[in-house]
């Protein structure tokens, strides 16, 4: 992919591609049974999406992800955040 593609994404989202790639890398190698790692990822996603994740919602998301271990159901996460 070329730089102009990434520049368009950055201009539309306001999120630097370096941060997106860093998040993707963190998710790819994350141990989803480790609560601390999961909590860091949830917070980073919230920051990148420019969404405040209240503590009770963060706890629910982390609990759900850790419970499922290596599988993350993004539909459940969207539902919990009221996005669907």
Image: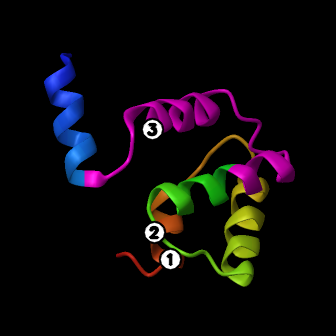
Q: How far apart are the alpha carbons under marks 3 and 1?
A: 20 Å
Q: Which residue was labeled with disc 2? A: 78
Residue bounds of the magenta highlight: 13-40
Quarter of the image for the N terminus: give it: top left
Counting from the top left corner in percent of width and height, residue 45 is at 54, 55
Q: Which residue was labeled with disc 1? A: 81
Q: Which residue was labeled with disc 3? A: 20
Asked if 25 appears above or below 80 in the picture, the reply is above
Q: Of the two numbered discs 3 and 1 on the same chain, state the one appearing first in sequence.
A: 3
Considering the whole magenta stretch, tell me its main secondary structure: helix
Left or right, residue 15 beside residue 28: left
Labelled pair 2, 1 in contact (Cβ < 8 Å): yes
Q: Secondary structure at mark 1?
A: loop
- Mark in the foreground, 2 or 3: 3
Asked if 74 appears above or below 58 in the picture, the reply is above
Asked if 69 appears above or below 28 in the picture, the reply is below
Magenta stretch encompasses residue 33: yes
Left or right, residue 16 beside residue 24: left
Asked if 66 appears above or below 34 in the picture, the reply is below
């Amino acid at each position: 992919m070329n730089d102009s593609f990434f520049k368009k994404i950055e201009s539309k989202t306001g999120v630097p591609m370096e941060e997106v790639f860093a998040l993707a890398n963190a998710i790819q190698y994350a141990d989803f049974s480790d609560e601390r790692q999961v909590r860091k990822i949830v917070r980073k996603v919230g920051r990148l999406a420019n969404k405040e994740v209240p503590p009770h919602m963060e706890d629910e998301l982390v609990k759900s992800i850790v419970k499922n271990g290596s599988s993350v159901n993004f539909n459940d996460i969207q539902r919990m955040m009221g996005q669907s």
